[in-house]
Amino acid sequence: MTALLDELDESGVKSSGDCYFLPYLSGERTPYNNPAMKGRFVGLTQQTTRAHMTYAVLEGVAFALKDGLQVINDAKVAIDSLSIIGGGAKSHYWRQLICDTLGLPITYRAGGDVGPALGAARLAAMSENDVELTNIARAVPKAIANHHPNVERQKALQTRYQTFRHLAAETL
């Protein structure tokens, strides 16, 4: 994955053109609640490069995150920023694309490689031992990088997101 992200970053590709990726490889729960949804590439041409397809995958996942964020917003829960962790989050390119897609500031935090596993272990300990969250939670890991939405790119992504939503609706 790192090699593909590096290749994409070096390519200068900032869009996938007419290429889209629907990331529903295991169906989708939010917001479609359809475990039978299928992932697919749409709009491939002879001019579509590997970098375009890599971008389309990242963009498709970011759009799926935006779908989830919309469900949260519809529930009247206000979110003004997010923290991001994990292997893919090591990529500045990927973090900025998520930031621009969601239109929210994003903080990349230290220790993200093991964060999900530690979080799951803490939840298991709470469940098994009836431990209160305040007794097991730790301080939020240190911020490594902060990202702010690029308004121009956000507008372009919003237009692409509408096409993505239309394509996703076709697979229902």
Image (tube, rainbow, N blue to C red):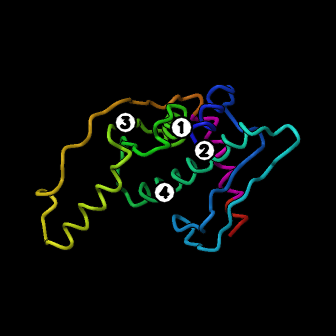
User: Is 129 on the left or on the right of 23, as rendered?
Assistant: left
In what element is the residue under mark 1? helix
To which residue does mark 4 refer? 68
Q: Could you classify mark 1 by the number of other residues whose Cα lies within 10 Å: few (under 14), some (14-19), or many (20 or more)?
A: some
Determine whether label 2 and label 4 are within 8 Å by CB: no
Classify residue 69 as left or right of residue 41: left
Question: For the residues marked 3 and 4, what is the alpha-carbon distance in whole angstroms?
Answer: 19 Å
What residue lies at 46% left-to-right and 44% top-to-bottom?
87
The disc, 1 or 4, on the residue closer to the chain's N-terminal end is 4
Question: In which quadrant of the rendered view does residue 140 lie?
Answer: top left
Please report whichever mark, 2 or 1, sits nearer to the chain's N-terminal start. Answer: 2
The x and y percentages for residue 29 are: 52, 68
Q: Residue furthest right?
A: 46
User: Does 156 lie within the magenta span?
Assistant: yes
Q: Residue 16: x percent and y percent?
A: 72, 39
Residue 152, position as x, y percentages in the image: 59, 28
Q: Are circles 2 and 3 on residues that touch, CB within 8 Å? A: no
- Mark 2, Cα crowd under 10 Å, few <14 / some 14-19 / many 20+, is many
Q: To which residue does mark 2 refer?
A: 58
| Of pointers 2 and 3, the one earlier in the residue sequence | 2
Mark 1–mark 4 Cα distance, whole angstroms, equals 18 Å
Q: CA distance from mark 2 to mark 3?
A: 18 Å
Residues drawn in magenta? 154-167
Could you say which disc has been placed on residue 107 in the image? Answer: 3
- Quadrant that contains the N terminus: top right
Q: Is residue 143 above or below residue 164?
A: above
